[in-house]
Amino acid sequence: MGRILAVDDELDMLSLLKMMVEGYTDHQVVVTNNPLEAKDLLEKERFDLVLTDLKMPGMDGLELLEFARRQDPDLLVLVITAFGSLETAEEAMAKGAFDYITKPFRKEQLLLAIDKAMRWRELVEQNKALRRQLEGGTP
């Protein structure tokens, strides 16, 4: 079971994300409609994945992406936006986004992207544990 932070200024979208993810996976979803609160949560709590909208007041999704990756370089971020363009997708990926999804999206599309991200995160964690074992440390 993973912990996912969902950040979107639209409350309806947050409710939908939480309902879809928790309804079809065993992941826990923490939601906030305030990207500045998301920063506080990222400083205090551990998450496996961040789902963030691109356009939000106060701080956009790319700024949140950069902050999240500074907090935890292994933290995966999926950027979700209604303002999709090749340019913004490329910028998000260049700044370290794991994936980029445009609204409206299908439930299956979102769940597949989350599944891929969580599997990747698990592989990274397993790799780190194996490295520690090989270096003589504890797992």
Image (tube, rainbow, N blue to C red):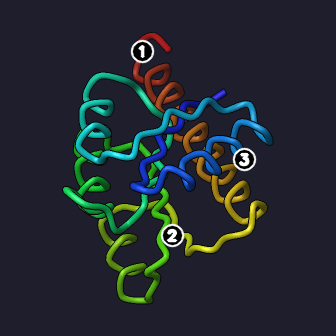
Near-viewer residue (100 or 104): 104
Residue that extends furthest to the top in the rendered view of this protein: 138
Residue at 41 percent of width and 40 percent of height:
32
Q: In this view, does 67 lie above or below 55?
A: above
Residue at 49 percent of width and 50 percent of height:
11
Determine which of the numbered discs, if any, sits on residue 100 in the image.
2
At label 3, the amino acid type is Met
Residue at 29 percent of width and 48 percent of height:
35
At label 2, the amino acid type is Tyr
Near-viewer residue (60 or 9): 9
Residue that extends furthest to the left in the rendered view of this protein: 58
Mark 1 or 2, nearer chain start = 2
Disc 1 target residue = 136
Q: How far apart are marks 1 and 2 (CA)?
A: 38 Å
Q: Considering the numbered disc 1 on the image, is that residue within a helix, a strand or a loop?
A: loop
Corner quadrant of residue 79: bottom left
Q: Considering the numbered disc 2 on the image, is that residue within a helix, a strand or a loop?
A: strand
Q: In this view, does 109 lie above or below 137?
A: below
The location of residue 46, given as percent across then percent down, is: 40, 26
Q: Name the side, left or right, on which 63 lies relative to 135.
A: left
Q: Is residue 113 above or below residue 123?
A: below
Corner quadrant of residue 26: top right
The location of residue 34, given as percent across then percent down, is: 31, 45
